[in-house]
Amino acid sequence: MLGIMMDKQLNIADILEYAAQYNTDAEIVTRQVEGGIHRYDYRSALRRTKQLANALQSLGVEQGDRIATLAWNTYRHFEIYYAVSGMGAVTHTINPRLFAEQIIYIINHAEDKYIFVDLTFVPLLEAIKDHIPVVKGFVVMTDKAHMPTSSLPNLMCYEDLIAPHSEDFAWPEFDEKTAAGLCYTSGTTGHPKGVMYSHRSTVIHAVSACRSSALNLGPLSRVLPVVPMFHVCAWGIPYSSPIAGSSIIFPGAGMDGASLYELIDTEKASALLGVPTVWLGLLNYIESINGNLDSVENVVIGGSAAPRSMMEKFQDVYGVFPIHAWGMTEMSPMGSLCAKTPYLMAADKEARARVQSKQGRAVFGVEMKIVDDQDQALPHDGKTFGKLMVRGPWVASGYYKNDDRSAFRDGWFDTGDVSTIDADGYMQIVDRSKDVIKSGGEWISSIELENHAVGHKAVAEACVVGIAHPKWDERPLLLIVRKPDADCSKEDIIGFLDDKVAKWWIPDDVVFVDSLPHTATGKLLKTEVRAKFERHYLE
Ligand code: AMP
Protein backbone atom coordinates (compact mmCIF):
# COMPACT_ATOMS: atom_id res chain seq x y z
CA MET A 1 0.00 0.00 0.00
CA LEU A 2 1.31 3.49 -0.81
CA GLY A 3 0.88 6.58 1.31
CA ILE A 4 -1.63 9.12 0.09
CA MET A 5 0.49 12.24 0.06
CA MET A 6 1.40 14.84 -2.53
CA ASP A 7 4.21 14.02 -4.89
CA LYS A 8 5.69 17.55 -4.89
CA GLN A 9 9.25 17.21 -6.15
CA LEU A 10 12.11 18.78 -4.20
CA ASN A 11 13.73 21.67 -6.06
CA ILE A 12 16.65 23.91 -5.10
CA ALA A 13 14.84 27.04 -6.37
CA ASP A 14 12.15 26.50 -3.72
CA ILE A 15 14.76 27.15 -1.01
CA LEU A 16 15.39 30.71 -2.19
CA GLU A 17 11.69 31.31 -2.86
CA TYR A 18 10.99 30.31 0.74
CA ALA A 19 13.78 32.45 2.21
CA ALA A 20 12.70 35.48 0.17
CA GLN A 21 9.17 35.17 1.49
CA TYR A 22 9.77 34.28 5.13
CA ASN A 23 13.36 35.03 6.13
CA THR A 24 13.19 38.73 5.48
CA ASP A 25 15.34 39.71 8.49
CA ALA A 26 18.40 37.85 7.24
CA GLU A 27 21.10 39.45 5.15
CA ILE A 28 23.80 38.32 2.76
CA VAL A 29 27.03 40.23 3.28
CA THR A 30 29.96 39.94 0.85
CA ARG A 31 33.51 41.19 0.94
CA GLN A 32 33.66 42.02 -2.76
CA VAL A 33 36.48 40.91 -4.97
CA GLU A 34 36.57 44.49 -6.34
CA GLY A 35 36.86 45.86 -2.78
CA GLY A 36 34.27 47.09 -0.28
CA ILE A 37 31.32 45.35 1.33
CA HIS A 38 28.07 44.47 -0.46
CA ARG A 39 24.90 43.62 1.46
CA TYR A 40 21.36 42.71 0.53
CA ASP A 41 18.59 40.31 1.58
CA TYR A 42 17.16 37.05 0.23
CA ARG A 43 14.40 38.99 -1.54
CA SER A 44 16.87 41.02 -3.60
CA ALA A 45 18.91 37.89 -4.19
CA LEU A 46 15.85 36.13 -5.62
CA ARG A 47 15.05 39.06 -7.93
CA ARG A 48 18.57 39.10 -9.36
CA THR A 49 18.65 35.29 -9.56
CA LYS A 50 15.56 35.41 -11.77
CA GLN A 51 17.16 38.08 -13.96
CA LEU A 52 20.14 35.76 -14.33
CA ALA A 53 17.91 32.77 -15.16
CA ASN A 54 16.30 34.84 -17.94
CA ALA A 55 19.75 35.90 -19.15
CA LEU A 56 20.93 32.30 -19.27
CA GLN A 57 17.88 31.36 -21.28
CA SER A 58 18.63 34.16 -23.74
CA LEU A 59 22.17 32.73 -24.11
CA GLY A 60 20.59 29.43 -25.16
CA VAL A 61 21.30 27.54 -21.93
CA GLU A 62 19.07 24.46 -21.75
CA GLN A 63 18.14 21.98 -19.06
CA GLY A 64 21.03 19.63 -18.35
CA ASP A 65 23.71 22.02 -19.68
CA ARG A 66 26.75 22.40 -17.44
CA ILE A 67 27.53 25.99 -16.47
CA ALA A 68 30.83 26.42 -14.64
CA THR A 69 32.10 28.85 -12.04
CA LEU A 70 35.67 29.76 -11.09
CA ALA A 71 34.87 31.98 -8.19
CA TRP A 72 35.21 32.95 -4.52
CA ASN A 73 32.39 32.96 -1.98
CA THR A 74 30.28 35.96 -3.01
CA TYR A 75 26.66 36.98 -3.54
CA ARG A 76 27.03 36.66 -7.31
CA HIS A 77 28.26 33.10 -6.93
CA PHE A 78 25.22 32.49 -4.70
CA GLU A 79 22.93 33.83 -7.45
CA ILE A 80 24.54 31.54 -10.03
CA TYR A 81 23.99 28.50 -7.76
CA TYR A 82 20.25 29.16 -7.73
CA ALA A 83 19.69 30.47 -11.27
CA VAL A 84 21.57 27.66 -13.01
CA SER A 85 20.18 24.77 -10.95
CA GLY A 86 16.73 26.34 -10.66
CA MET A 87 16.30 26.48 -14.43
CA GLY A 88 17.29 22.80 -14.68
CA ALA A 89 20.92 23.24 -15.75
CA VAL A 90 23.93 22.06 -13.69
CA THR A 91 26.13 24.34 -11.56
CA HIS A 92 29.68 23.09 -12.00
CA THR A 93 32.05 24.62 -9.46
CA ILE A 94 35.72 24.45 -10.48
CA ASN A 95 38.47 24.57 -7.89
CA PRO A 96 40.92 27.26 -9.12
CA ARG A 97 43.69 25.77 -6.99
CA LEU A 98 43.93 22.71 -9.21
CA PHE A 99 46.76 22.45 -11.72
CA ALA A 100 46.02 23.96 -15.15
CA GLU A 101 46.00 20.49 -16.76
CA GLN A 102 43.39 19.30 -14.27
CA ILE A 103 41.22 22.37 -14.89
CA ILE A 104 41.43 21.78 -18.65
CA TYR A 105 40.51 18.12 -18.13
CA ILE A 106 37.55 19.00 -15.89
CA ILE A 107 36.10 21.66 -18.23
CA ASN A 108 36.32 19.34 -21.24
CA HIS A 109 35.03 16.34 -19.32
CA ALA A 110 32.04 18.30 -17.99
CA GLU A 111 31.57 19.98 -21.42
CA ASP A 112 30.91 23.33 -19.78
CA LYS A 113 28.90 25.64 -22.04
CA TYR A 114 29.69 28.91 -20.25
CA ILE A 115 32.08 29.82 -17.46
CA PHE A 116 31.39 32.49 -14.85
CA VAL A 117 34.68 33.80 -13.54
CA ASP A 118 35.84 36.16 -10.80
CA LEU A 119 38.33 38.90 -11.75
CA THR A 120 41.07 37.03 -9.88
CA PHE A 121 40.85 33.99 -12.15
CA VAL A 122 40.58 35.69 -15.57
CA PRO A 123 44.36 35.24 -16.21
CA LEU A 124 44.05 31.57 -15.30
CA LEU A 125 41.42 31.07 -18.03
CA GLU A 126 43.35 33.19 -20.54
CA ALA A 127 46.30 30.83 -20.14
CA ILE A 128 44.22 27.76 -21.02
CA LYS A 129 41.62 29.21 -23.40
CA ASP A 130 43.00 27.39 -26.46
CA HIS A 131 42.52 24.02 -24.76
CA ILE A 132 38.84 24.40 -23.84
CA PRO A 133 37.02 24.69 -27.19
CA VAL A 134 33.76 23.35 -25.64
CA VAL A 135 33.17 26.68 -23.87
CA LYS A 136 30.98 29.13 -25.79
CA GLY A 137 31.60 32.21 -23.66
CA PHE A 138 32.89 33.69 -20.42
CA VAL A 139 31.07 35.94 -17.97
CA VAL A 140 33.22 38.05 -15.64
CA MET A 141 31.47 38.35 -12.27
CA THR A 142 31.74 42.13 -11.96
CA ASP A 143 30.25 45.42 -13.16
CA LYS A 144 31.14 47.55 -16.19
CA ALA A 145 33.50 49.78 -14.23
CA HIS A 146 35.71 46.81 -13.27
CA MET A 147 35.65 44.88 -16.54
CA PRO A 148 39.19 43.86 -17.51
CA THR A 149 40.57 43.90 -21.00
CA SER A 150 41.03 40.27 -21.81
CA SER A 151 41.91 37.92 -24.63
CA LEU A 152 39.05 35.57 -23.68
CA PRO A 153 36.61 35.13 -26.58
CA ASN A 154 32.92 36.04 -26.21
CA LEU A 155 33.54 37.93 -22.99
CA MET A 156 30.54 39.28 -21.04
CA CYS A 157 30.06 41.37 -17.93
CA TYR A 158 27.78 39.88 -15.25
CA GLU A 159 25.94 43.07 -14.38
CA ASP A 160 25.45 44.01 -18.03
CA LEU A 161 24.26 40.50 -18.78
CA ILE A 162 21.48 40.47 -16.20
CA ALA A 163 20.48 44.18 -16.27
CA PRO A 164 18.05 44.09 -19.24
CA HIS A 165 16.19 41.03 -17.98
CA SER A 166 12.93 40.67 -16.12
CA GLU A 167 12.78 39.93 -12.38
CA ASP A 168 10.05 37.37 -13.10
CA PHE A 169 10.91 33.82 -13.95
CA ALA A 170 8.74 30.74 -13.60
CA TRP A 171 10.98 27.95 -12.34
CA PRO A 172 10.30 24.82 -14.41
CA GLU A 173 9.06 21.70 -12.63
CA PHE A 174 11.04 18.51 -13.07
CA ASP A 175 11.93 15.24 -11.40
CA GLU A 176 13.75 15.87 -8.10
CA LYS A 177 16.43 13.41 -9.18
CA THR A 178 17.44 15.88 -11.93
CA ALA A 179 21.14 16.82 -11.83
CA ALA A 180 21.75 20.16 -10.06
CA GLY A 181 25.43 20.48 -9.20
CA LEU A 182 28.75 19.01 -10.25
CA CYS A 183 31.93 18.97 -8.19
CA TYR A 184 35.15 17.13 -9.05
CA THR A 185 37.18 15.45 -6.34
CA SER A 186 40.87 16.09 -6.49
CA GLY A 187 42.50 12.81 -5.62
CA THR A 188 46.25 12.56 -5.30
CA THR A 189 46.47 10.24 -8.32
CA GLY A 190 44.59 9.92 -11.62
CA HIS A 191 42.10 12.32 -13.15
CA PRO A 192 39.63 14.20 -10.95
CA LYS A 193 36.26 12.43 -10.68
CA GLY A 194 32.92 14.20 -10.99
CA VAL A 195 30.24 13.91 -8.31
CA MET A 196 26.82 14.87 -9.67
CA TYR A 197 24.40 16.11 -7.00
CA SER A 198 20.64 16.12 -7.61
CA HIS A 199 17.96 18.55 -6.42
CA ARG A 200 16.74 15.84 -4.07
CA SER A 201 20.15 15.09 -2.54
CA THR A 202 20.98 18.79 -2.16
CA VAL A 203 17.70 19.76 -0.49
CA ILE A 204 17.61 16.81 1.91
CA HIS A 205 21.26 17.39 2.84
CA ALA A 206 20.60 21.09 3.49
CA VAL A 207 17.57 20.41 5.70
CA SER A 208 19.54 17.90 7.71
CA ALA A 209 22.66 20.07 7.94
CA CYS A 210 21.05 23.02 9.69
CA ARG A 211 19.50 21.15 12.63
CA SER A 212 20.76 21.95 16.13
CA SER A 213 22.24 18.46 16.39
CA ALA A 214 24.25 19.20 13.23
CA LEU A 215 25.56 22.67 12.22
CA ASN A 216 23.13 24.38 14.61
CA LEU A 217 21.89 27.15 12.29
CA GLY A 218 18.85 29.32 12.96
CA PRO A 219 17.47 32.81 12.33
CA LEU A 220 19.92 34.34 14.83
CA SER A 221 22.98 32.75 13.21
CA ARG A 222 25.40 34.83 11.18
CA VAL A 223 27.30 32.22 9.24
CA LEU A 224 30.76 32.75 7.81
CA PRO A 225 31.59 29.94 5.36
CA VAL A 226 35.35 30.15 4.86
CA VAL A 227 35.20 26.78 3.14
CA PRO A 228 34.99 27.71 -0.54
CA MET A 229 31.90 27.42 -2.72
CA PHE A 230 34.22 25.65 -5.18
CA HIS A 231 34.80 22.84 -2.69
CA VAL A 232 31.65 20.76 -2.07
CA CYS A 233 29.39 23.83 -2.27
CA ALA A 234 30.88 25.42 0.87
CA TRP A 235 29.62 22.37 2.80
CA GLY A 236 26.07 23.18 1.66
CA ILE A 237 25.87 26.52 3.52
CA PRO A 238 24.38 28.41 0.51
CA TYR A 239 21.45 25.98 0.74
CA SER A 240 21.12 25.35 4.48
CA SER A 241 21.40 29.00 5.61
CA PRO A 242 18.34 30.22 3.61
CA ILE A 243 16.34 27.27 4.96
CA ALA A 244 17.37 28.08 8.54
CA GLY A 245 16.82 31.81 8.03
CA SER A 246 20.46 32.57 8.86
CA SER A 247 22.46 35.49 7.54
CA ILE A 248 25.48 34.61 5.42
CA ILE A 249 28.78 36.47 5.44
CA PHE A 250 30.76 35.67 2.28
CA PRO A 251 34.50 36.35 2.70
CA GLY A 252 35.28 36.80 -1.01
CA ALA A 253 38.99 36.38 -1.68
CA GLY A 254 40.10 37.24 1.87
CA MET A 255 40.93 33.92 3.53
CA ASP A 256 43.93 35.12 5.60
CA GLY A 257 43.75 35.61 9.35
CA ALA A 258 43.63 39.42 9.29
CA SER A 259 40.85 39.64 6.66
CA LEU A 260 38.78 36.97 8.36
CA TYR A 261 39.18 38.56 11.76
CA GLU A 262 38.05 41.94 10.48
CA LEU A 263 34.94 40.39 8.93
CA ILE A 264 34.11 38.35 12.04
CA ASP A 265 34.54 41.40 14.22
CA THR A 266 32.63 43.96 12.16
CA GLU A 267 29.87 41.63 10.94
CA LYS A 268 29.49 39.80 14.27
CA ALA A 269 29.80 36.32 12.77
CA SER A 270 28.42 33.63 15.09
CA ALA A 271 29.14 30.41 13.18
CA LEU A 272 32.37 29.75 11.29
CA LEU A 273 33.14 26.85 8.96
CA GLY A 274 36.51 25.88 7.53
CA VAL A 275 39.53 23.60 7.43
CA PRO A 276 42.23 23.49 10.15
CA THR A 277 44.84 25.44 8.14
CA VAL A 278 42.48 28.40 7.83
CA TRP A 279 41.83 28.37 11.59
CA LEU A 280 45.54 28.17 12.28
CA GLY A 281 45.98 31.43 10.34
CA LEU A 282 43.08 33.05 12.18
CA LEU A 283 44.20 31.94 15.65
CA ASN A 284 47.77 33.11 15.04
CA TYR A 285 46.50 36.49 13.94
CA ILE A 286 44.13 36.90 16.91
CA GLU A 287 46.95 36.00 19.27
CA SER A 288 49.24 38.58 17.66
CA ILE A 289 46.74 41.42 18.19
CA ASN A 290 45.30 40.18 21.47
CA GLY A 291 41.87 39.93 19.85
CA ASN A 292 38.75 38.00 20.78
CA LEU A 293 35.98 35.95 19.21
CA ASP A 294 33.17 37.27 21.39
CA SER A 295 30.46 37.07 18.72
CA VAL A 296 31.29 33.48 17.76
CA GLU A 297 29.37 30.53 19.21
CA ASN A 298 30.52 27.62 17.02
CA VAL A 299 33.40 26.87 14.74
CA VAL A 300 33.04 23.87 12.47
CA ILE A 301 36.41 22.24 11.77
CA GLY A 302 36.56 19.64 9.02
CA GLY A 303 38.29 18.55 5.84
CA SER A 304 41.29 17.31 7.85
CA ALA A 305 41.58 16.16 11.44
CA ALA A 306 41.21 18.97 13.97
CA PRO A 307 44.22 18.95 16.32
CA ARG A 308 43.42 18.90 20.03
CA SER A 309 45.52 22.02 20.62
CA MET A 310 43.36 23.95 18.13
CA MET A 311 40.08 22.80 19.66
CA GLU A 312 41.30 23.68 23.13
CA LYS A 313 42.35 27.14 22.04
CA PHE A 314 38.92 27.84 20.54
CA GLN A 315 37.14 26.44 23.57
CA ASP A 316 39.25 27.39 26.54
CA VAL A 317 40.79 30.67 25.37
CA TYR A 318 38.05 32.17 23.18
CA GLY A 319 34.89 30.46 24.49
CA VAL A 320 33.96 29.08 21.06
CA PHE A 321 32.50 25.57 20.79
CA PRO A 322 34.45 23.55 18.18
CA ILE A 323 32.35 21.15 16.12
CA HIS A 324 34.70 18.56 14.67
CA ALA A 325 33.11 17.34 11.43
CA TRP A 326 33.87 14.79 8.76
CA GLY A 327 32.59 14.40 5.24
CA MET A 328 33.62 14.24 1.64
CA THR A 329 32.78 15.50 -1.84
CA GLU A 330 30.98 12.22 -2.53
CA MET A 331 28.77 12.92 0.53
CA SER A 332 27.59 16.47 -0.28
CA PRO A 333 29.70 16.57 2.13
CA MET A 334 28.20 16.00 5.56
CA GLY A 335 28.83 12.63 7.20
CA SER A 336 29.39 12.96 10.93
CA LEU A 337 30.10 15.54 13.58
CA CYS A 338 30.61 16.14 17.29
CA ALA A 339 27.63 18.24 18.36
CA LYS A 340 26.99 19.45 21.91
CA THR A 341 25.60 16.71 24.15
CA PRO A 342 24.81 16.67 27.87
CA TYR A 343 27.80 14.38 28.41
CA LEU A 344 30.18 16.64 26.52
CA MET A 345 29.02 19.80 28.26
CA ALA A 346 29.47 18.22 31.71
CA ALA A 347 32.72 16.36 30.96
CA ASP A 348 36.10 17.38 32.34
CA LYS A 349 38.81 18.59 29.97
CA GLU A 350 40.36 15.15 29.33
CA ALA A 351 37.06 13.37 28.73
CA ARG A 352 35.85 16.15 26.45
CA ALA A 353 39.07 16.05 24.41
CA ARG A 354 38.73 12.27 24.01
CA VAL A 355 35.28 12.72 22.44
CA GLN A 356 36.06 15.82 20.39
CA SER A 357 39.18 14.30 18.85
CA LYS A 358 36.79 11.88 17.12
CA GLN A 359 35.04 12.86 13.90
CA GLY A 360 31.68 12.36 15.58
CA ARG A 361 28.37 10.65 15.18
CA ALA A 362 26.67 10.08 11.83
CA VAL A 363 24.05 12.74 11.09
CA PHE A 364 20.56 11.45 10.42
CA GLY A 365 20.47 10.30 6.79
CA VAL A 366 23.97 8.77 6.78
CA GLU A 367 24.58 5.15 7.73
CA MET A 368 28.12 4.03 8.54
CA LYS A 369 29.87 0.71 9.01
CA ILE A 370 33.46 -0.49 9.12
CA VAL A 371 34.50 -3.60 7.21
CA ASP A 372 37.55 -5.81 6.68
CA ASP A 373 39.24 -6.61 3.35
CA GLN A 374 36.43 -9.07 2.50
CA ASP A 375 33.81 -6.38 3.22
CA GLN A 376 32.71 -8.22 6.38
CA ALA A 377 31.33 -5.93 9.11
CA LEU A 378 33.64 -5.27 12.06
CA PRO A 379 32.61 -4.53 15.66
CA HIS A 380 31.86 -1.00 16.88
CA ASP A 381 34.14 -1.22 19.90
CA GLY A 382 36.20 1.93 19.41
CA LYS A 383 39.34 -0.17 18.86
CA THR A 384 38.91 -2.28 15.73
CA PHE A 385 40.02 -0.43 12.56
CA GLY A 386 38.25 -1.01 9.25
CA LYS A 387 37.38 0.49 5.90
CA LEU A 388 34.65 3.06 6.47
CA MET A 389 31.59 2.47 4.27
CA VAL A 390 28.60 4.83 4.05
CA ARG A 391 25.20 5.05 2.40
CA GLY A 392 22.39 7.57 2.34
CA PRO A 393 20.28 9.85 0.13
CA TRP A 394 23.07 12.41 -0.33
CA VAL A 395 25.89 9.91 -0.95
CA ALA A 396 27.09 9.44 -4.58
CA SER A 397 26.14 6.19 -6.31
CA GLY A 398 28.81 6.53 -9.00
CA TYR A 399 31.01 9.11 -10.76
CA TYR A 400 29.95 11.25 -13.71
CA LYS A 401 30.90 9.71 -17.09
CA ASN A 402 33.25 7.28 -15.33
CA ASP A 403 33.05 3.48 -15.30
CA ASP A 404 35.16 2.98 -12.18
CA ARG A 405 32.76 1.36 -9.72
CA SER A 406 35.37 -0.12 -7.40
CA ALA A 407 34.32 2.07 -4.45
CA PHE A 408 30.59 1.32 -4.91
CA ARG A 409 29.76 -2.12 -3.53
CA ASP A 410 26.44 -3.66 -2.40
CA GLY A 411 24.69 -0.31 -2.15
CA TRP A 412 27.51 1.17 -0.01
CA PHE A 413 30.30 3.61 -0.82
CA ASP A 414 33.84 2.86 0.33
CA THR A 415 35.10 6.22 1.59
CA GLY A 416 38.78 5.30 1.31
CA ASP A 417 39.11 6.21 4.99
CA VAL A 418 40.08 3.77 7.72
CA SER A 419 38.29 4.33 11.01
CA THR A 420 36.98 2.98 14.30
CA ILE A 421 33.41 3.37 15.55
CA ASP A 422 32.79 3.15 19.31
CA ALA A 423 29.81 1.76 21.20
CA ASP A 424 28.24 5.25 21.42
CA GLY A 425 28.48 5.64 17.65
CA TYR A 426 31.45 8.04 17.55
CA MET A 427 33.55 7.48 14.45
CA GLN A 428 37.26 8.25 14.47
CA ILE A 429 39.32 8.50 11.31
CA VAL A 430 42.55 6.56 11.71
CA ASP A 431 43.88 7.42 8.26
CA ARG A 432 43.23 7.42 4.55
CA SER A 433 43.55 3.75 3.59
CA LYS A 434 46.55 4.60 1.41
CA ASP A 435 48.26 6.59 4.18
CA VAL A 436 47.95 4.18 7.09
CA ILE A 437 51.42 2.88 8.03
CA LYS A 438 51.84 -0.88 8.05
CA SER A 439 54.64 -1.73 10.42
CA GLY A 440 55.45 -5.37 11.26
CA GLY A 441 51.89 -6.46 10.43
CA GLU A 442 50.31 -3.78 12.67
CA TRP A 443 48.82 -0.43 11.67
CA ILE A 444 49.98 3.01 12.77
CA SER A 445 47.77 6.08 12.33
CA SER A 446 49.69 8.89 10.62
CA ILE A 447 46.89 11.32 11.57
CA GLU A 448 47.18 10.57 15.27
CA LEU A 449 50.94 11.10 15.22
CA GLU A 450 50.50 14.40 13.35
CA ASN A 451 47.88 15.59 15.81
CA HIS A 452 50.19 14.95 18.73
CA ALA A 453 53.17 16.57 17.00
CA VAL A 454 51.34 19.84 16.29
CA GLY A 455 50.64 20.08 20.01
CA HIS A 456 54.36 20.92 20.51
CA LYS A 457 54.79 24.67 20.93
CA ALA A 458 57.47 25.01 18.24
CA VAL A 459 55.59 23.06 15.56
CA ALA A 460 53.54 24.84 12.88
CA GLU A 461 52.70 21.81 10.75
CA ALA A 462 53.48 18.09 10.83
CA CYS A 463 53.27 15.29 8.31
CA VAL A 464 53.79 11.58 8.95
CA VAL A 465 54.31 9.06 6.15
CA GLY A 466 55.12 5.37 6.04
CA ILE A 467 58.52 4.73 4.43
CA ALA A 468 59.79 1.34 3.25
CA HIS A 469 61.92 -0.32 5.95
CA PRO A 470 64.16 -3.41 5.53
CA LYS A 471 62.88 -5.08 8.69
CA TRP A 472 59.39 -3.74 9.46
CA ASP A 473 57.90 -3.24 5.97
CA GLU A 474 57.22 0.41 6.74
CA ARG A 475 58.20 2.78 9.51
CA PRO A 476 56.84 6.26 10.24
CA LEU A 477 58.84 9.31 9.22
CA LEU A 478 57.84 12.65 10.75
CA LEU A 479 58.32 15.91 8.83
CA ILE A 480 58.05 19.15 10.77
CA VAL A 481 57.64 22.77 9.73
CA ARG A 482 58.74 24.88 12.68
CA LYS A 483 56.89 28.05 13.69
CA PRO A 484 58.76 31.23 12.69
CA ASP A 485 61.44 32.04 15.27
CA ALA A 486 60.76 28.79 17.15
CA ASP A 487 63.30 26.05 17.62
CA CYS A 488 63.19 22.37 18.48
CA SER A 489 65.35 19.31 17.85
CA LYS A 490 64.57 15.75 16.85
CA GLU A 491 65.12 14.70 20.47
CA ASP A 492 62.64 17.34 21.72
CA ILE A 493 59.94 16.05 19.38
CA ILE A 494 60.55 12.37 20.11
CA GLY A 495 60.57 13.13 23.84
CA PHE A 496 57.31 15.05 23.45
CA LEU A 497 55.61 12.10 21.75
CA ASP A 498 57.00 9.57 24.20
CA ASP A 499 54.09 9.43 26.67
CA LYS A 500 51.40 10.04 24.04
CA VAL A 501 51.59 6.98 21.81
CA ALA A 502 52.78 3.37 22.01
CA LYS A 503 56.58 3.03 21.87
CA TRP A 504 56.52 1.23 18.51
CA TRP A 505 54.53 4.10 16.97
CA ILE A 506 57.33 6.62 17.61
CA PRO A 507 58.76 7.76 14.24
CA ASP A 508 62.27 6.45 13.53
CA ASP A 509 63.34 9.84 12.27
CA VAL A 510 62.27 13.50 12.26
CA VAL A 511 63.11 15.78 9.33
CA PHE A 512 62.72 19.56 9.52
CA VAL A 513 61.46 21.21 6.32
CA ASP A 514 60.56 24.77 5.27
CA SER A 515 57.16 23.82 3.89
CA LEU A 516 55.00 20.82 3.02
CA PRO A 517 53.16 20.14 -0.25
CA HIS A 518 49.34 20.39 -0.24
CA THR A 519 46.53 19.35 -2.59
CA ALA A 520 44.15 21.87 -4.13
CA THR A 521 41.82 21.40 -1.17
CA GLY A 522 44.51 22.03 1.41
CA LYS A 523 45.24 18.43 2.43
CA LEU A 524 48.81 17.18 2.80
CA LEU A 525 50.05 15.75 -0.48
CA LYS A 526 51.57 12.60 0.99
CA THR A 527 52.27 10.91 -2.34
CA GLU A 528 54.85 13.62 -3.02
CA VAL A 529 56.37 13.35 0.44
CA ARG A 530 56.58 9.56 0.20
CA ALA A 531 58.22 9.75 -3.23
CA LYS A 532 60.81 12.24 -1.99
CA PHE A 533 61.76 10.19 1.09
CA GLU A 534 61.24 6.77 -0.51
CA ARG A 535 64.73 5.51 0.35
CA HIS A 536 65.14 7.30 3.67
CA TYR A 537 65.27 4.10 5.77
CA LEU A 538 66.97 1.97 3.12
CA GLU A 539 70.15 3.99 2.78
P1 AMP B 1 37.15 15.99 0.10
O1 AMP B 1 36.31 15.11 -0.74
O2 AMP B 1 38.18 16.74 -0.65
O3 AMP B 1 36.30 16.86 0.96
O4 AMP B 1 37.98 15.06 1.07
C1 AMP B 1 37.37 14.11 1.89
C2 AMP B 1 38.38 13.46 2.78
O5 AMP B 1 38.95 14.39 3.68
C3 AMP B 1 37.81 12.39 3.68
O6 AMP B 1 37.63 11.16 3.02
C4 AMP B 1 38.86 12.32 4.78
O7 AMP B 1 39.97 11.54 4.39
C5 AMP B 1 39.30 13.76 4.89
N1 AMP B 1 38.60 14.41 6.01
C6 AMP B 1 37.51 15.18 5.97
N2 AMP B 1 37.18 15.62 7.19
C7 AMP B 1 38.08 15.08 8.05
C8 AMP B 1 38.28 15.14 9.46
N3 AMP B 1 37.50 15.85 10.27
N4 AMP B 1 39.30 14.43 9.98
C9 AMP B 1 40.13 13.70 9.18
N5 AMP B 1 40.00 13.62 7.86
C10 AMP B 1 38.98 14.30 7.29
Image (cartoon, grey):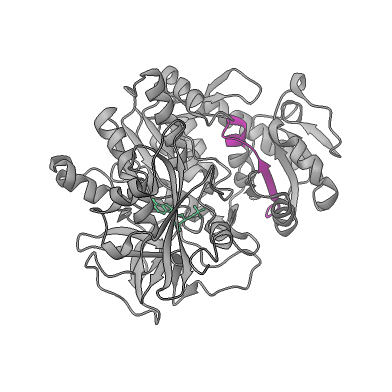
User: Residue 137: x, y in percent?
Assistant: 81, 42
Q: Residue furthest bottom?
A: 374
- Residue drawn at 17 percent across, 48 percent down: 351
Horizontal side of residue 507 vs 153, given as left or right: left
- Foreground pick, 29 / 507: 507
Asked whether, in this view, residue 261 is left or right of residue 380, the answer is right
The answer to whether one can see residue 302 in this image is yes
Q: Is residue 221 above or below residue 309?
A: above
Q: In this orientation, does residue 28 appear? A: no
| Residue 517 position (above or below residue 387) | above
Residue at x 17%, y 45% (from the top left corner)? 350
* Residue at 39%, 59% in the rendered image: 446
Q: Is residue 194 left or right of residue 338?
A: right
Query: Compared with residue 478, is residue 278 higher up or lower down, i.e. above or below?
Result: above
Q: Quadrant of residue 383?
A: bottom left
- Could you tell me how many numbered marks the image carries? 0
Return the x and y of residue 310 as percentages of the image width and height: 34, 39
Range covered by the magenta-colored residues: 63-79
| Quarter of the displayed picture in which ligand 1 can be seen | bottom left
Q: Position of residue 476 (x, y in %)?
A: 41, 62
Q: Residue at x 15, y 44 (%)?
A: 342
Q: Is residue 75 magenta?
A: yes
In x, y percent, where is residue 220?
34, 27
Asked whether residue 21 is drawn in magenta, I would say: no
Q: In the picture provided, is 47 more to the left or to the right than 468?
A: right
Q: Quadrant of the N terminus?
A: bottom left
